[in-house]
Image: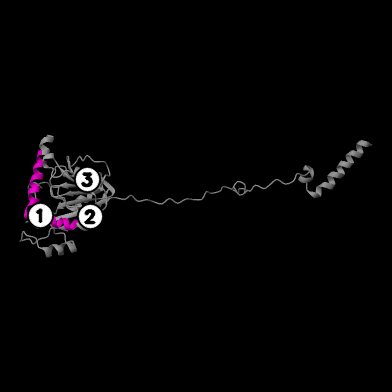
Amino acid sequence: MSITSTQQRLADAVRRGRQFWDSGPGAALWRAERACLGPHCEHRHGVLSLQLGMAPLISDMSPIRHTLEWAPSAALARQSNTLVCAPERLPLADDSLDLTVVHHLLEAVERPHQVLQEAARVTRADGRLVVFGWHPYAPAGGAPRRHQPPWQQPWRTPRRLRDWLEFVDFEIERVDYCGFRLPWRSARNRCLETFGRRYNVPLGQAYLLIARRRALPVQPITLREPKLVGAKSGAWLGLARHHPQAPTRDVASAGDPPSARPLQEAATRRVESSRSA
């Protein structure tokens, strides 16, 4: 399989995906997803964010100053701030993005695990990784069908993505569902959308997954006092103090106890008398 053919298939999938998001059902779902992302994104501050997907920018309401869009080729770039590259090889440094959005792209690429791993690599430790995916157990109708272009790859549940995120040291912070409608109707109902989002009913056509880097547990270090082996003097413990030197005295008188002085003087006189005799 050549690289050119892989890029061509990805470019065709992006064109098909953009046609869906420009249609009526796609635009309605995009607005529902944007409203679902808003409360989690409006308080995220930073410098740089990136969206990997086929739809228009969905996180432009965040206070992050610069937002990058992605395209697989220069011919599909819609803005000047578009990152043209393969989704599994992003030309960005590690921990460089404050917000990374993967919007319905894992169901369209041949190596979704590598795309998710690359998105996690460029996300900062205090940033957020947002993944939009198709819910495989949602009612049919009004959304793309499974195993059909451009989302012909397997549709994975949030539980499955949890295992993938644990491999790259990320953990799920929250999962929200959006895109609610009645099974026998293709159009969405605003009241049903409000009810489903309020109680987070897992029957929406799409889900929003927010992940963050897993925090390593830190165990506090307890400092222990040194144990003293045997009895130590005060000087060894650093308790001795320097005192000014006392006036000098006779070594014999200063070193001998007072009770021994008369005996020493008597012995000295006895020796001198014996010498004179």
Residue carrying label 2: 41
Q: Position of residue 93 (x, y in %)?
A: 26, 41
The residue nearer to you, when weighing 44 against 111, is: 44
Q: Callout 2 environment at 10 Å: few (<14), some (14 to 19), or many (20+)? A: some
Q: Secondary structure at mark 1?
A: helix
Q: Residue at x 19, y 56 (%)?
A: 37
The segment highlighted magenta reads 8-37
The answer, for residue 73, to whether it is visible in the render is no
Q: Is residue 132 shown left or right of residue 274? A: left
Instruction: Give the foreground label among 2 and 3.
Output: 2
Disc 2 and disc 3: Cα gap in Å? 17 Å
Residue sitting at x 79%, y 45%: 253
Q: Quadrant of the C terminus?
A: top right
Marks 1,2: beta carbons within 8 A: no
Q: Which mark is residue 119?
A: 3
How is the rendered protein coloured? one colour
Specify the amino acid type for callout 2.
Cys
Which dot marks residue 27? Answer: 1
Asked if the magenta segment contains residue 13, the reply would be yes
Q: Amino acid at mark 3?
A: Ala
- The alpha-carbon separation of the residues under discs 3 and 1 comes to 25 Å
